[in-house]
Image: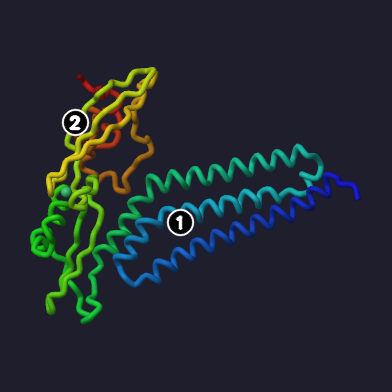
Amino acid sequence: MEFTYSNFLGIWQIFIIGLAVLSALAGIVIFITHRLKITSLSDYKQKYDYIAANDTKMILYTIVAFAISITAFINSVYHDTVLLSFIWFCVRMFIALCLGTLIVYISNLMIKFAYPSTLERKMKHWRYKPRVNKKTGNTMKLLSEDEEDVHLDEGMQAEENVFSVDYDVWVDEETGDVQIEKYPGHLIAHQCNSCGFKTMKLVKEEIVTSPTQESDGEMIKYYKCSYCNAKRNKNVKVAKLSQTETHYELPAHLHFKNEEKVNRVALEIYISNGKTKVFEFGSTKQASEFLKEFKIED
Ligand SMILES: [Zn+2]
């Protein structure tokens, strides 16, 4: 049998419809498995941790699977027209690939900029949903920052004081049973080699060799543990200076859900000499404009 363009199209049609169906099924399976996993975890803290680590990833996988399915499906339509010439096969392929890429690209943008607030709401729900004491069935009470310190050891308190870890303490007021849960804090601190707590903070940075446009520089970072005072330093490379200076700009489409309720926008800028600068603005537009003008003075 001679292998003709129409034979090829026949095989292609079976292959591409199969791919469309399979990837749509994969998308459904990924999404359902993810939902089932969340439902199956009975512990609220475990739900929180699972969502924090996997939710964004799983939603993106689901979208990619559906995007592949749509791309494949488009590659199966207008069969009679495509049969006329191979050019039409290429045109259809091109349109399908563009559309598939666009779906993934836009979804990715939405996940990056719009989804985090939804995710945060989900995570807050599981973090603050009243715990139930498994032994007594009593509803537990979440202690305030001031009340919880008696239940935390000194190392844990030190971690809270540098904002690297946040502990939630739940108490069964009838029996006095305590449940302590660990959450990441607002600021970054590293784990101390000596005491094991997350209380190692960067205190100073020293440039040994300044970077030039031709070669990397070198810098020493000094860390100190705010609990046991252990010290550590680390040599790090400083990247070559770029030829063209580019300024960071906030994305133009960054809008808060209720923009009118936003009072201030804060920008925290970490400069390579170890200094930090915080600037506050009334809107994201103002902040963007400031960044165009911002220069680090010596
Ligand atoms: Zn330490």
Residue at x 20%, y 42% (from the top left corner):
263
> Eyeballing the image, is 193 above or below 269?
below
Residue 189 in percent (x, y) is at 22, 45
Task: Please identify the quadrant where the C terminus is shown.
Answer: top left
Residue at x 32%, y 21% (from the top left corner):
211
Amino acid type assigned to the residue bearing label 1 in the image? Met
Q: From this viewpoint, which residue is outermost toward the right? A: 1
Residue 174 in percent (x, y) is at 12, 79
Along the line of sight, the residue nearer the viewer: 101 or 193: 193
> Eyeballing the image, is 203 above or below 42?
above
Along the line of sight, the residue nearer the viewer: 144 or 118: 144
Left/right of residue 157 with respect to residue 234 in the rendered view: left
Q: Residue 58 shows which numbered tag?
A: 1
Left/right of residue 121 with respect to residue 11 in the rendered view: left
Instruction: From the image, tell me which residue sits under label 2.
Output: 275
Whether the residue carrying mark 2 lies under 8 Å from ligand 1 is answered with no
Residue 136 in percent (x, y) is at 21, 82
